[in-house]
Amino acid sequence: MKKEFTLVIVSILLSSLSFAQTTIQPKQIDYSNEGVIYNKELAIDLRIHTNNGFALAANFGQIKTYYKTHYYHFEIGAVRHPKEHRQSFDPSGGFSRTSRSFMFGKQNSLFVLRAGLGRKRYFSEKAKQKGLALGITYEIGPAIGILKPYYLEIINEGNGTGDPFLVSTRYTEETASTFLDVTRIYGASGFTKGFSELSLVPGIQFKASVHFDWGAFDEFVKAMEAGIMGDIFIREMPIMADVEFAENRPYFINLFLTLQLGKRW
């Protein structure tokens, strides 16, 4: 009886061991996010681009793996026409108002609101050793062009009935002759002039750049980007008045340089 009981116990133990060997497997380790310490990042962009344009932006990123980050981009910036040139003219007249520099022939100022969905990818693992990480970024999304009329202080002679005085004037077909007469321009009006007359033009925007990151997974973001950006609108953007060699167009392609600072958590 003891022998039979012992055989039953041994059989049960062997069966249990066999079951454990066949059903209990080591947990598979996912190495796809190796090196990831943080999950999210917030970065602020300070950008300059060709034709004296500039922008301020915010990026909200989700760190997916060591090599890949998805981010949402929001930005406001200014776009200038290649033919915009600031100049000064100091006519006599004894006006109490100080003369300001101005852009001759400028019809509207253009500001752009941009949003986008972007990707950032690194090429190497150097950032793990807190070295310089090299990668690329690219994004695309909607854009809204904001046109603000540009006003000039125009000298009105008073038609011989009194002393000359200044009239804040925007470009129209009726004012074209005086608006484009440099001898009548005293200077630009104040920056806030024209904000009640804004017009909006929808479009799309895109960016692609080379990304340089000093310690891609440090707590603080310290990076630079250099690349190409574009804005394409549904119609021509009338930045300049109808003056020689100042063609307006619905698109703007620029090279840019960005300083990026932020934090990861």
Image: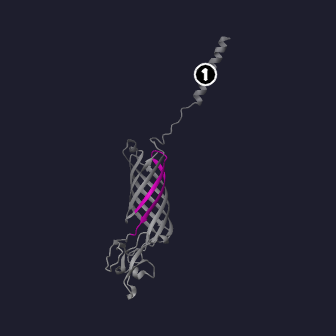
Above or below residue 108? Residue 17 is: above
Above or below residue 238? Residue 143 is: above
Q: Which residue is mark 1?
A: 14
Coloring scheme of the render?
A: one colour
In the displayed structure, does residue 228 sit left or right of residue 13? Answer: left
- The location of residue 83, given as percent across then percent down, is 37, 71
Above or below residue 180? Residue 27 is: above
- Residue toward you, 220 or 244: 220
Q: Residue at x 44, y 52 (%)?
A: 43
Q: Few, some or many C-alpha atoms within 10 Å of disc 1 (few <14, some 14-19, many ≥20)?
A: few
Residue sticking out furthest to the right: 1
- The location of residue 201, given as percent across then percent down, is 50, 68
- Magenta span of residues: 54-81
Question: In the image, what residue type sits under mark 1?
Answer: Leu
Q: Main secondary structure of the magenta part?
A: strand
Q: Residue at x 45, y 66 (%)?
A: 111
